[in-house]
């Protein structure tokens, strides 16, 4: 049964009220009618089996038949800091990282990034990325929707990562660890933070700043991958090793 997310305030137990774009999608595209069942998530690790009771132009109302609580994760959440990428590449990383189960995505403003955010468009762009994450979380049936933050400067991101097990993805290093053999935390109370650079790579001073902030440089091996490829490979390896995938 497909999963649809609604804002938590749309659920007043035992009633669920669906409005806006999701209402139009369910009513007009999927032809949902009274008596049908929906699986609804609140984005806060709860799901509800809902029977549709009324459908109108203003709202779709439903009655909660059963509530499901997310089982314990048993693994650390993963935060991805992704340097801003050109064109649709950033959209693609957000979509696929969501499918792979990241908990938070932070777009990063870095020295060699091809694109830099325009102040007047930041709010609209961030909202667009959040919608991409929402749709990907529904498609992949996640228990929650990752938060996509507004773009941050690297120094701000590094400072906020204190207290987590933090890594910065690098290439062309003669020594160091790979994501295959680096030590990872194993409990839900811990957090993994991964920083991935832009198309032009990290500036040397950015890597040095990250190391000073406690980030450990790691690589994916000798191959030089495109930025968007590296991000998803890194996330996949971490999620496999912590038990999210496989």
Image (tube, helix red, strand yellow):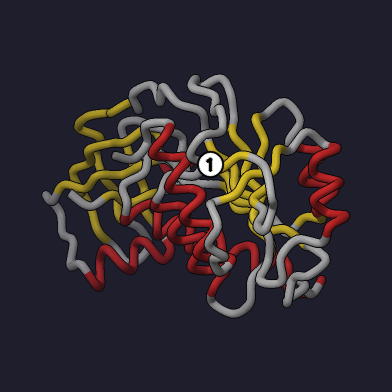
Local crowd size for mark 1, using a 10 Å CA cut-off: few (<14), some (14–19), many (≥20): many
Query: Does residue 40 appear to the left or right of 182 in the view shown?
Result: left
| Residue located 50% across and 64% down the image | 229
- Picture quadrant where residue 151 is located: bottom right
In depth, the one of 49 and 147 nearer the eye is 147
Query: Does residue 29 appear to the left or right of 103 in the view shown?
Result: left
| Residue located 31% across and 56% down the image | 139
In x, y percent, where is residue 13? 35, 30
In this view, 243 is above or below 29: above
Residue on which the image places disc 1: 179
Query: In which quadrant of the rendered image does the C terminus lie?
Result: top left
In depth, the one of 76 and 52 nearer the eye is 76
Outermost residue toward the bottom in this view: 87
In depth, the one of 236 and 122 nearer the eye is 236
In this view, 207 is above or below 88: above
In x, y percent, where is residue 18? 36, 53
- Picture quadrant where residue 110 is located: bottom right
| Residue located 11% across and 49% down the image | 35
* Numbered circles on residues, count: 1
Outermost residue toward the front in this view: 174
In x, y percent, where is residue 74? 41, 22
In x, y percent, where is residue 102? 49, 44
| Residue located 18% across and 43% down the image | 51
Q: Is disc 1 placed on a helix, strand or loop?
A: loop
């Amino acid at each position: 049964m497909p999963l649809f997310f609604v804002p938590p305030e749309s659920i007043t137990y035992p009633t669920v009220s669906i409005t806006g774009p999701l209402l139009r999608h369910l009513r007009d595209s999927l032809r949902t009618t009274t008596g049908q069942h929906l699986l609804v998530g609140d984005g806060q690790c709860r799901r509800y089996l809902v029977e549709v009771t009324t459908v109108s132009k203003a709202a779709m109302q439903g009655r909660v038949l059963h509530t499901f609580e997310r089982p314990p994760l048993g693994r650390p959440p993963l935060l991805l800091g992704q340097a801003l990428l050109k064109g649709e590449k950033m959209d693609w990383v957000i979509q696929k990282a969501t499918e792979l189960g990241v908990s938070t995505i932070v777009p990063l403003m870095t020295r060699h990034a091809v694109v830099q955010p325009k102040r007047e468009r930041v709010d609209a762009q961030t909202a667009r990325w959040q919608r991409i994450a929402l749709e990907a979380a529904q498609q992949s049936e996640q228990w929650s929707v990752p938060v996509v933050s507004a773009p941050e400067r690297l120094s701000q991101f590094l400072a906020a990562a204190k207290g987590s097990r933090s890594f910065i993805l690098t290439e062309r290093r003669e020594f160091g660890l790979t994501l295959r053999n680096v030590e990872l935390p194993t409990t839900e109370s811990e957090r993994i933070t991964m920083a991935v650079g832009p198309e032009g790579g990290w500036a040397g001073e950015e890597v040095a700043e990250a190391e000073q902030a406690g980030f450990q440089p790691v690589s994916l091996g000798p191959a030089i991958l495109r930025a968007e490829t590296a991000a998803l490979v890194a996330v996949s390896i971490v999620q496999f090793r912590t038990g999210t995938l496989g």
